[in-house]
Each structure stands twice: as C-alpha cells, then as structure tokens.
Image: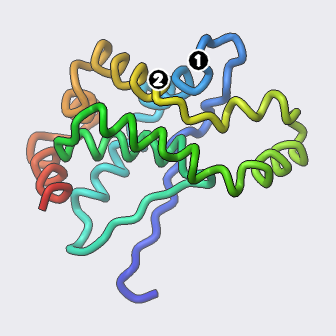
C-alpha cells in the first residue's frame, strides 16, 4: 500500500524458553534485551524516524516481542510503570480468542500443549520484574537504549515522536 513501510525485525531470534528459569517469560525477555539489542535499537530508531502518522508494531501473538517493544516505547513516552505493566496484562484478555489456535499450532510443531501453555501467560508480575531487572542491569530504559546504540539525538527524537 502506498505510504506504508513494512519492516520485519526479529527481536527474539535464538531466544528459546528455558524450562529451568523461575519465570520463563521474564528470562526470555531479559535475554532478548541483552542479546538482541541491535534489533531493539532498529525498532526504536524506526519509530523515532517514522513519518508523521501512526506507527504499528506487532508480532504473532502480540505479547512478547510486541510487549517488550510497547514497554520500551511507553516508558520513553513517560508512561508510569504501573500503566506499562497493566497494558501488558491486558494482553491476556485480548489473547483469549486465539489461545487454543496458538496451542494447536504449537502442538503441530511438536510442542506439548502443557509445555506451551505457560508461554501464553501475561502476568503483570512478569513485566514488573522484567522492568525492575532492566533498571538493575542498565539503569533505565533511556540508559538501555543508549547502551545499544541510540545516541542523545535519537533518544530525543524518539521521545518527541512518542509524545507529540
């Protein structure tokens, strides 16, 4: 469609669930932030440099890659952490209509329904713990983004884009 740019960026490439992790999703989110920083930087740069108008980002289920992107963007827009966590938790309701379809696809790919079902959780505690761990490791979301390559000007553009 004219005026629409499509970008396929793999944020979780190579980041597989580890069953031994106390919170499998938080573990995946933190490993993605650490290992896929260049991809997160690319997403945030695309948002910052997008032409006027809406920006849409999504993934297959709209909770992991989308959830992390939204958490970073909302935080950069000055949204309170409680609201970021609540936004993530809303995904559980939105995911309900397709939950069984996602499980069926996973089973067709060789996963057991029992092992896949926890990956569809959207517990607010997971996002709260992820953001707390991000702060502990990197200082803040702006510090994390600076550390993965967004300079001062890019951070300012991102903040303006998200709050304009």
User: Of tags 2 and 1, which is closer to the observer?
Assistant: 2
Q: Secondary structure at mark 2?
A: helix
Residue 23 - label:
1
Position above or below: 47 against 138:
below
In this image, 48 relative to 59: left or right? left
- Dots 2, 1 in contact, CB < 8 A: yes
In the depicted view, which residue is nearer to us: 50 or 148? 50
Q: Residue 156 at x, y = what percent?
A: 10, 48
Label 1 CA crowd tier, 10 Å (few <14, some 14–19, many 20+): some
**What whole-number distance in Å separates the C-alpha atoms at marks 2 and 1?**
10 Å
Q: Secondary structure at mark 1?
A: loop
Residue 97 - label:
none
Answer with the quarter of the image where residue 41 lies. top left
In the depicted view, which residue is nearer to us: 30 or 153? 30
Residue with the mark numbered 2: 125
In this image, 158 relative to 74: left or right? left
Position above or below: 143 against 45:
above
User: What's the residue at 62%, 54% (across, down)?
Assistant: 60
In the depicted view, which residue is nearer to us: 71 or 125? 125
Q: Residue 63 at x, y = what percent?
A: 54, 45
Q: Residue 67 at x, y = what percent?
A: 46, 43
In the depicted view, which residue is nearer to us: 163 or 96? 96
User: What's the residue at 55%, 35% (across, down)?
Assistant: 122
User: What's the residue at 25%, 37% (across, down)?
Assistant: 149
Q: Is residue 79 visible?
A: yes
Answer with the quarter of the image where residue 2 lies. bottom left
Label 2 CA crowd tier, 10 Å (few <14, some 14–19, many 20+): some
């Amino acid at each position: 469609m004219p005026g629409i740019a499509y970008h396929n960026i793999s944020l979780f490439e190579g980041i597989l669930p580890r069953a031994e992790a106390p919170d499998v999703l938080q573990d995946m989110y933190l490993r993605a932030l650490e290992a896929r920083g260049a991809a997160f930087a690319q997403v945030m740069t695309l948002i910052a440099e997008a032409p006027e108008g809406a920006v849409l980002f999504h993934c297959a289920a709209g909770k992991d890659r989308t959830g992390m992107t939204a958490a970073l963007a909302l935080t950069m827009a000055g949204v309170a952490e409680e609201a970021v966590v609540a936004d993530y938790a809303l995904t559980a309701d939105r995911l309900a209509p397709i939950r069984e379809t996602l499980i069926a696809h996973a089973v067709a790919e060789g996963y057991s329904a029992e092992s896949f079902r926890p990956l569809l959780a959207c517990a607010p505690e997971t996002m709260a713990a992820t953001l707390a761990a991000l702060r502990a490791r990197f200082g803040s979301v702006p510090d994390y983004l600076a550390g993965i390559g967004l300079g001062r000007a890019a951070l300012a553009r991102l903040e303006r884009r998200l709050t304009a």
